[in-house]
Image (cartoon, rainbow, N blue to C red):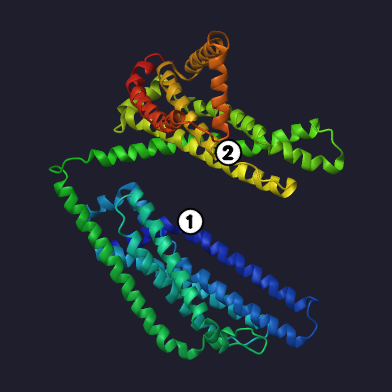
Amino acid sequence: MARLRALLFREWRLNRKAQLLQLLLFLLYAGMMWAACLSNMYGDSLEDPADRAMTLRGMIQASALMLALLSGCLGLSMDFTMKSDLESGWLRYSYALPITTRDRVLARMLRSAIATGIGTAFSLLNIAGLCALADQPFEAGYVVMQVAVVALVLLMTVLNDCFILGARSPEHLKKRTNQSGLALTGVGLLAALWLYKFGGERFLSRWQDPDGVVDLMQLFSLRRLLWLLPLTLVLIACHYGVMYWRLRCAEETSLGSSRTKASKPEDRSIQTQGHFTGFFYKELRQNRQGILLVVLLPAALQVLIALMLLFVELTSPESLSNGVIAILTNSLVRCIGTAIAAFCVSGMLTGVFLGDDKKLWGYFVASTPAGIRGAMYSKYLLLALMNVLYLAAWYVTDCCLATLRYFAVGEEAPSLLGLYVAVFFLLLLLSALDIPFIVRYGAKKGSIIKLIYMLSLAILFTVIFAMVLPETIRDRLIQKAIDLYHGQVSTGLLLAVGLYPWGALTAYCLSYKLSCKLFLKGVNRYD
């Protein structure tokens, strides 16, 4: 008995904040209903006594149903014991104490029963007070409604415990909680769909008055207790059985794993996977603003171009909007916008490494189970994801512009999807060239070195193209670029275009391998 009292006190301590919050919500709703009933009784909204009595009866019934739901959930839905046990390690430690599975189950059920009883008493007293205030009879249907709601919440709790009590770690508990939520939502949707599709209206029409209002007191008549009470007892037994089965399995699993822990080799792959997930989550949290900017940049850039055109456009006010739209959706303007956005995104991608070029962080990364490969893999994966988001955002923006041009000008804008895909692989290729420099020399020095070699390449290309190449070859290259823009490609150029994405992906993968090798050399040069 002393063990049971101690466990019961522990259950209350772990769940006290949640239950007090639910009780406060319960009392707040009850106060709102009292205020609504008093306002209806002594206000001037309804002068006819019959209409006022009917309205009060409907309000009391709706209040009774809501309070029954709140009081039923008060003791059964809020259960943070499992989460606390897993996070603190008490679940494993307690198996060495003289506590049986039966004691655990009884403590949980007693805590739920006491909280549900208190909530039910508050609910029925509140409804009785409202009935006395409104001069309405306190009917047995309110009690039946309370029993029905408790049975419903018990059923949901049994289904929830089948998932939750099988967790063996906090991460496993989160996964089981999501699975339980999806399962309960699916069951509720299927039940609602079945009632609506196959007899819900016919079922409710039996308790509707001529105005179409359902009388809950007829729905929850006293004879419903003939099957509600046995159903509730069966659900209580199922609740006990499920909790005993799950907690017993957890105890046997824990004791069995503790006996074989010394002889069982440690699974490093699971740890590595967990640390990689942590690295990737850290990248998402650290660069969430950059990800959002990449998504919003295409639309923001087009709005900026439109505002610039509004100041430049000199046509009459009647043709101003159409003229701006015609220029804004012009293929050349869209290509210029794509180039500007690609340049901006290239700089944003470099910002992923800002803050990580620290010697302490580099040594910590090297000491984790995932290691350098896990950290760099998360970086490269995030950069690829940002490129994909940029491609999708720009394509959606371009589709909106094409639709706008069709409605404003009456012309269909040519699709630039091929250009966007080419820019996507170009960004991958630029990232493949940038990242090894950033890893080797740090974000600031690496960016300067990248700028130097890009300017050098641009100057070299300009000198060769403008001064070294003969005019005939230069004209031929310009003509090939024009043909490529219009979709007229030769066999050799088509082969080069087909190999370009694979070359970019290969360079991206080789860049990852090179960055892993250069990581520790770069860490020694960090601050």
> Dot 2 surroundings within 10 Å: few (below 14), some, or many (20 or more)?
some
Q: Residue at x 32, y 73 (%)?
A: 238
Q: CA distance from mark 1 to mark 2?
A: 57 Å
Q: Nearer the viewer, mark 1 or mark 2?
A: 2
Question: Disc 1 or 2, which lies upstream in sequence?
Answer: 1
Q: Secondary structure at mark 2?
A: loop
Task: Answer above or below: position of 190 versus 422.
Answer: below
Q: Residue at x 58, y 36 (%)?
A: 293
Q: Is residue 403 left or right of residue 9?
A: right
Say which amino acid is labelled 2.
Leu
Q: Quadrant of residue 245?
A: bottom left
Q: Is residue 229 left or right of residue 392?
A: left
Can you identify the residue that label 2 sits on? 416
Q: Quadrant of residue 415?
A: top right
Q: Secondary structure at mark 1?
A: helix
Mark number, residue 351: none
Q: Nearer the viewer, residue 484 or 61?
A: 484
Q: Position of residue 448 (x, y in %)?
A: 51, 14
